[in-house]
Image (cartoon, rainbow, N blue to C red):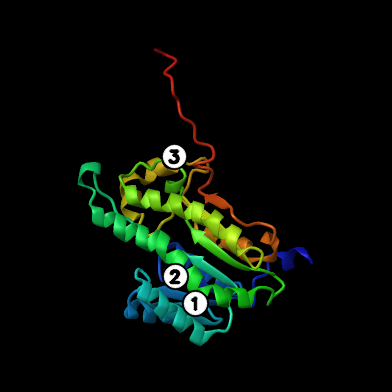
Amino acid sequence: MTTPDLFDISGRTVLVTGGARGIGRMIAEGLLRSGATVLVTTRKPEAAEEAQRELSRIGGTVHAIAADISTEEGCRDLAEQVGALIDHLDGLVNNAGATWGAPFDEFPPSAWDKVLGVNVKTPFILTQLLRPLLEAGAGATPSGPSRIINIGSIDGLAVPNYENYSYSASKAAVHHLTRHMASTLAPSVLVNAIAPGPFPTRMMQWAIDEHGDEMNEANPLGRLGRPEDAVGLVTFLLSPASSFITGTTIPLDGGLTTTMSVNLYDTEN
């Protein structure tokens, strides 16, 4: 296999949840440009119609599906819609997520139910429901096993600067769920996670507006993530080049978490 073949994902069929905006949209656009058939989900029908129009301009085959996957019923509805469109899946990118911020003493119980439900329970239920399609895709292309990519966060790797307790806990859970699922689903499905740092998305916009300069200065590479950063790593994990990797969580943060240091002692005093 030549080097270009190692990273070729043309002809692959990939579902990206929450693919109408944010990192999910970046991924969906990149996969379309690489020749993949892409299905994206979003909660509202009007958002699905808009995503269908805009993504179709890129070319290739795209299906935008409206489904509220925050509920078990919505997950089943999505699985049925996907099954009506395709007969196999080569990749599932569990990207849809929710967050919540509030001071510790004001953090409500409902924030735990909502965030852990969408961020942890939904990827698990969707994988259960879509497993037959994923296993039907295993070996259907030269890329070999089908792939699941769970989108975690660096907030699940290190204590964040924000009071988003249920979000950070949920992302740490996603990273461990990735390992557990990888053990169960091998060898027909490979399961890995990506832990993004700050990217210019609507979810992060308030933080960028208020602390953008400090965020850049704190990063070893001096910048935020770019669409091509997310697309490049997802493409690698979907391609034959990653066929011997499963159960990993890869930080996508410019080295922010892997090079951070803590000064435990003030040596000047």
Amino acid type, mark 3: Glu
Judging by the rendered image, the residue that carries numbered circle 2 is 19
Instruction: Label 1, secondary structure: give it.
Output: strand
Judging by the rendered image, the residue that carries numbered circle 3 is 217
Residue 70 at x, y percent in the picture: 35, 68
Q: Residues within 10 Å of mark 2 (few under 14, many from 20)?
A: many
Instruction: Label 3, secondary structure: give it.
Output: helix
Residue 4 at x, y percent in the picture: 73, 66
The residue mark sitting in front, 1 or 3, is 1
Q: Residue furthest top?
A: 269
Q: Do tag 1 and tag 3 residues touch (Cβ < 8 Å)?
A: no
Q: Do tag 2 and tag 1 residues touch (Cβ < 8 Å)?
A: yes
Residue 91 at x, y percent in the picture: 57, 70
| Earlier-in-chain disc, 2 versus 1 | 2
Q: Residues within 10 Å of mark 3 (few under 14, many from 20)?
A: few
The residue depicted at 38 percent of the width and 49 percent of the height is: 168
Is residue 205 or residue 188 the one in the foreground?
Answer: 188
Q: Is residue 105 visible?
A: yes
Between the C-alphas of marks 2 and 1, the distance is 8 Å
